[in-house]
Image: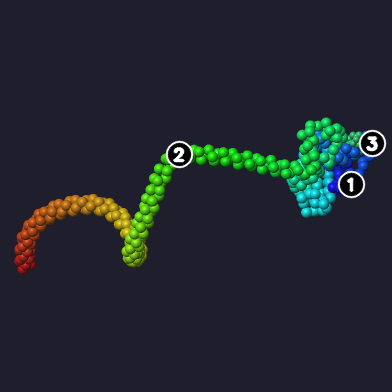
Amino acid sequence: MYFKRIEMQGFKSFADPVIIEFHEGITCIVGPNGSGKSNISDAIRWVLGEQSPKLLRGGKMEEVIFAGTTNRKSRGMAEVTLVIDNSTGILPIEYNEVAITRRMYRSGESEYLINNNQCRLKDIRELIMDTGIGVDGYSIIGQGKIADIVSTKAEDRREIFEEAAGVVMYKKRKSQAEKKLGSAQDNLDRVSDIVNEIEDRIGSLREDSTKAKEFLNLRDRYKFLEINLALNNIGNLDKNTEALKGIVSESEEKIKSLVNKRDSLEAEMDQLMEKNENLDELSAEANDNLIRKVNELNIINSQGQVNEERLSAVDKDIARLKGEIKETDEKLNSENAKLKELEKNEEVLQADKISAEKKLHDAVIRLNS
Ligand code: ATP
């Protein structure tokens, strides 16, 4: 006995959760036509991974979700769990009881679980392979299926019995091994083709091989010489390195002293720059002074011109005055000459006056006498 119970909810006519226990012996489900008996075997097929809606007596897979009735609302999800007794170890899994669950939503999304752990459909198929439980096995035989089995081809019937006998897995492995054997044979054929081809070319290959050996010897020799040359170069390089080290340290010293010189020159330059700045300031000041002086000079120059003009007028005045003085002097000289003459005349007249006055006095005296 493998199936322990089946739990359904939202699956076909089972809107509410329903649990059907399968006890020892035969379990019968009895009911009137259309009451939903076949929906239970559909649920078993479906939970074991059936992918064909037709084999579930529908058009589309979503039709397995409870569609609702006049009195009940439809459901958004169908869920079926089939609990299998694994105490005999029929399933290759370390559990005494295995619950396989399948869920489907109206969006078309599906979920598979083994003992409540999410898994792939492939995992469920592998779990029940060769147990006869699978959807292609003999354990689920729907209405009219017996007639199908009886009337079907001997080859198809054989498949059903092979699944029941648990030889499908071995058959599968055998066919895989045969496939591998076939490809190994192909490889072998290819290898023997190559061997034949190589045998044809063996003569020229022998020659090539001798040449190759020669080449390898020469290459080894070349490598040996190349290495020796490299070692020699390395020795020379070491010597050069020592000499270069000396040059480098000398250069470093020179650089140091040049750096010091540069620093002191920079300091000097700073001082000179400072001086230069001062000189610039002084030069600007001197320039200002110069401009001021030039302006003053210009003013003085223009005044000088005025003064010169004045001076020349004064000179002219002086010349004129000198002329006048000369004229006056001449006049004065002539006046002096005239004065001297007049003075002479006056002296003469004075003498005349004195003699006249004497004569007068004498005359008076004589008169009085
Ligand atoms: P019979 O053995 O005479 O064929 P049965 O008892 O096996 O009949 P089923 O054919 O399994 O009955 O049941 C069909 C019932 O399931 C119908 O009443 C149908 O309306 C109902 N049914 C099928 N799919 C759904 C669904 N998605 N939602 C609601 N009810 C559904």
Q: Amino acid at mark 2?
A: Arg
From the viewer's side, name the closer residue of 256 and 6: 6
The disc, 1 or 2, on the residue closer to the chain's N-terminal end is: 1
Disc 3 residue lies near ligand 1 with CB under 8 A: yes
Quarter containing the C terminus: bottom left
Q: Name the secondary structure under disc 3.
A: loop
286 to the left or right of 195: left
- Please tell me whether mark 2 sits on a helix, a strand or a loop: loop
Distance in Å between CA atoms under marks 3 and 2: 85 Å
From this viewpoint, which residue is outermost toward the bottom? 369
Tell me the mark number nearer the camera, choosing from 3 and 1: 1
Asked if residue 305 can be seen in this view, the reply is yes
SS for tag 1?
Answer: loop
Q: In this figure, which residue is indicated by the disc labeled 1?
A: 22
Q: Residue at x 77, y 38 (%)?
A: 159
- Which callout, 3 or 1, points at the residue further toward the start of the chain? 1
Ligand 1 quadrant assignment: top right
Mark 1 vs ligand 1: CB below 8 Å: no
Q: Residue at x 78, y 37 (%)?
A: 158
Relative image position of residue 309 (x, y in whole percent): 23, 50
In this picture, residue 356 sits left or right of residue 120: left
The amino acid type found where label 3 is placed reads: Pro
Horizontal and vertical percent position of residue 261: 33, 65
The residue closer to the viewer here, 354 or 193, is 193
CA gap between label 3 and label 1 equals 21 Å
Residue 62 placement (x, y as % from top left):
80, 37
Residue 201 circle label: 2
Number of the front mark, 3 or 2: 2
Instruction: Tell me the residue that label 3 is attached to.
Output: 32
In the image, residue 168 lies at what x, y percent?
Answer: 75, 42
Determine whether, in the image, residue 224 is placed left or right of residue 36. left
Quarter of the image for residue 112 reads top right
